[in-house]
Amino acid sequence: MEQNTTLILEGGAMRGLFTSGVLDVFMENDLYFPQVAGVSAGALNGVNYVAHQPGRSRAVNLDYVNDPRYMGASHLIKDFSYFNFDFLLGEVSETLNPLDFDTLYSSPQKLWAVATDCRTGGPVYFEKNQPGIDFMDAVRASASLPLMGRMVKVGREVCLDGGVANPVPLPAELPFASGKAVLVLTRQAGFRKSGQHRVVRRLYRRRYGAHPELLEACLTGPERYNQRMDEIDRLEEAGEIFVIRPDGPVTVSRAERSVEKLDALYRRGRAAAEAALPAMKEFLGLE
């Protein structure tokens, strides 16, 4: 695979189980992209992928989704974060289902976590071996959803969920040279977001009023997401990118707790990847 070939992973919180299935099929077929950019749950999935640990993302989520240490309102009240990243990136990754940190950091694969700069409302990209940062802080920031997570300091930056600024980066927007690009999305073709409820907009203004650029990014999120999906459809139709996504509506919520629904979505990801492999390899010039 050419060294500037890029894999771009959308977020979606628990909908990221679809991406987990896709990446497990990639790993089982020894398909490792030289460059990976992940947004939110896509960054978490990217960590397991670059650590070469098939099955880990599925196991962690299904084993602990109903563990009160993983997520819940109590964490939101106590730590301003619905998802307990201290548990997920701490005890789970270090002891309960260890992440292979040695492989992650020594791998020649490049991995970027995309976050939102709370001062500018724009995207910021952190690479796993970037000096001056703790990459796990960058992953935490990338996955810290607005209103459901607290701001995270990464080096000198203060950040939130990467999906606020840029839900799916396009190759031309990445801070590195990208060749052929494969995008893994977590919504079906044609999905578009509806407008925000006035209560949500009020909460955004109350929470982020002191950060006007971030507030503007939050308030305009649905419109910018829909524009991005329009552009992705255009690039896919033109053959400039390759896209893997669910074949129909996804009913899994961002904070889904049903093991059965999550496992079904994971299996849909596997099926989508297996079906896409021949065409994707042709697109990448691997056959």
Image: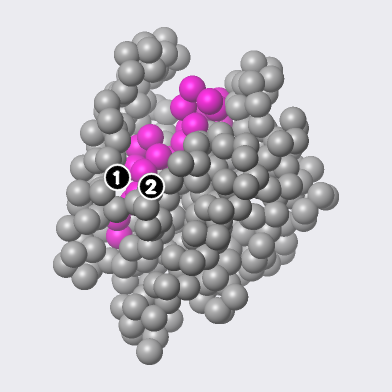
Label pair 2/1, CB-CB below 8 angstroms: yes
User: Between residues 42 and 118, which one lies in front from this camera angle?
Assistant: 42
User: Between residues 235 and 89, which one lies in front from this camera angle?
Assistant: 235
Residue wearing tag 1: 191
Range of magenta residues? 145-171
Furthest residue toward bottom? 287
Task: Kindly report which numbered mark, 2 or 1, lies closer to the viewer in this rendering.
Answer: 2
Q: CA distance from mark 2 to mark 1?
A: 8 Å
> What quarter of the picture does the N terminus occupy?
bottom left
Residue type beneath disc 2: Pro
Q: Earlier in the sequence, mark 2 or mark 1?
A: 1
Question: Viewed as shown, does residue 152 lie left or right of 185?
Answer: right
The image position of residue 172, as x and y in percent, is: 26, 58
The image position of residue 61, as x and y in percent, is: 66, 47
Categorize mark 2 by other alpha carbons within 10 Å: few (<14), some (14-19), many (20+): few
Above or below, 47 against 251 in this view is: below
* Label placed on residue 249: 2
Instruction: Name the image colouring.
Output: one colour
Above or below, 212 against 271 in this view is: above
The image position of residue 94, as x and y in percent, is: 79, 50
The image position of residue 54, as x and y in percent, is: 64, 66
Above or below, 198 against 64 in this view is: above
The reply to whether the magenta stretch includes residue 28 is: no
Q: Secondary structure at mark 1?
A: loop
Residue type beneath disc 1: Phe
Q: Secondary structure at mark 2?
A: loop
Question: Viewed as shown, does residue 101 lie left or right of 28?
Answer: right
